Image: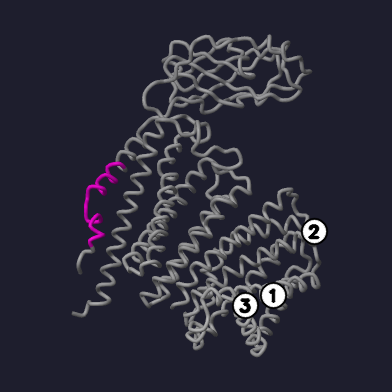
Amino acid sequence: MEMIKKDKWMYRSYWKILGVLLFIYVLIGGLGTPLKPGIYQLDAPTSAKPGEYVSIKVTGYNSTYAKAEKVEAWLKLDDGHYTSSLRNQVIDNERIIVNFLLPPASNKEDYVPLTLIMYNEIDGPTVLPDAISLSPVTAQSDTAAFTQWQDQINSTLTPKSGILFPYRNILHETIRNTFFHVALWLAMVIILIAGLYHAIAYLRTKNMRNDKLSAAYNTTAIVYGLLGLATGSIWARFTWGTWWTTDVKLNMAAIAMLIYLAYFILRSSINDFDKRARFSAAYSIFGFVALIPLIFVIPRMYDSLHPGNGGNPALGGEDLDNTLRMFFYPSIIAMILIGVWISSVFYRIKKVEEYILTSGDQ
Amino acid sequence: MQLTRILELIRKDFILEIRNAQTISAIILFTFTVSFIVYKSFNVLQAQSWNVMLWIVTLFSLLNSLVKSFNGDAAKTGIFYYSLYHPTEVILAKIVYNYFLSLFVFSLIYLAFSFLLENHVRDHALFTSGALLGILGISVTFSFVSAIIASQENGMVLLMAVLALPLTLPCMLVMIKISSVALGLMVDSSVYQDLMILGGIDLLLLSMVFLLFNQLWKA
């Protein structure tokens, strides 16, 4: 069984080593880097009247309330209008009671959500939106109301330095799943496109090498897709409280899996090599095209919990900060390299199988 | 590629269907039987379930009606057509014929549902245009897959279902949404955009079939 010249790169090891090294870097850094401090939980009434005295028991995460020299806290009405806490009782590093005397005025005749901002010189600023809501009172004019919310944040809030992942209130530690769940899906799409390329190339050249490569890439894509579903499901369990939802993106992803699993049923049901190659190439091209509306059109027609829909940010702006990028991009590259490696192994298995079937008797 | 040649092929399919009345009568009986099962299982069907049941019954009836659409050709006469007609003519004729057959099957089911149960449709124009576009997408997909599995000896219906059903999902989802608007189940001012999306999906599927059928036909 001679080696095809075009396949030489499969037998080189530098890119496989690069992929594995990048993956180890992502594993160690992505799982080992601590989160920034944050506010984990509040023990407080859900709403308070203007002029009322409220005391809020704050449970922090990775915080150092006892160690810090001075802990400051503010409740924020809107930009530029704050009220600062009267006095704080520190219990330990993770727990603190902050007390506020709310100003006796509000500018709306409706519940107003107040944001809790805490600061100490070790942790840097930590923020919890919708910490408590201000009960409705007879509204005063903006200027009259705002004169009573006049405490300013005096100290410059320097964030905690060092390589730390951002703290997000719903995600907590699962923010690390970005490196696995999201990177798996991106790598899957790239590998599917590689499979599509070889399917088209097969139909143009009728070279069996392209058929085997196409099937190999599609197999890997299926494996990645199932892993993506599994990691997503675990993430959904933590953040949304359920393994699976009726969410449109999840179900479209499941349908994509069904289409590509059907591709393998089709392959296994045809015995003739040429016919199998031609039909499965045609089906995989058709399936890929049918996926385009499923992935890019229909999810936009429905609301979704999933990031990237209905006002939920996906990979833009504040959700992917620079420390996450340090591991996210290497993770995508590592997943693609490892995926191509897996595919090349599938390809070589298929080559051996064909060799045994056609000339194994001698 | 000429219109008359395509019409010839459609006429041939039609005559074969009429002569071999067993298939078409089986389809008619199948649709009524399934509609009756739905009717007696539910007795009273709310608009939402009516909508979903109508499309599910349609989907599976079309699956059964179109599964053999290339079977007769592939067996003996395939080479004969291959020498006479261009593959594009063959698939175009087949799609047109399958489309009309699908519309016929759908109208049977629709009549049965309206007769046995109740007709919940409020916006008939919207419902009809959604059905016309959606059934086009489904029949194109089924035609393509039945061309793929034409050479299979056994397990045809199962393979067809596995291969084709996930592919029809984009059409089905948009179509069910449009028809629930037409039934007054939900209010959506951008429903005409959905109609355009459905038409776009149809065009996408059609162009893929034309591009790929050349490859299948040589087999």
The circle on residue B65 is 3
User: Which of the two residues, A105 or A331, is positioned nearer the viewer here?
Assistant: A331
In the image, residue B21 sits, relative to residue A113, either above or below, namely: below
Callout 2: chain: B
Q: Distance between the Cα atoms at labels 1 and 3?
A: 8 Å
Secondary element type, mark 3: helix
The circle on residue B123 is 2
Q: Main structural element of the magenta stretch: helix, strand or loop?
A: helix
- Crowd band around label 2 with a 10 angstrom C-alpha radius: few (<14), some (14–19), many (20+): some
Type of the residue with mark 3? Ser
Say which residue label 1 marks.
B105
Answer with the quarter of the image where residue A358 lies. bottom left
Q: Distance between the Cα atoms at labels 2 and 1?
A: 21 Å
Give left or right: position of A165 versus A309: left
Span colored in magenta: A5-22
Type of the residue with mark 2? Asp
Callout 1: chain: B
Q: Position of residue A28 (x, y in %)?
A: 32, 37
Proximity of marks 1 and 3: CB atoms separated by less than 8 Å: yes
Answer with the quarter of the image where residue A208 lies. bottom left
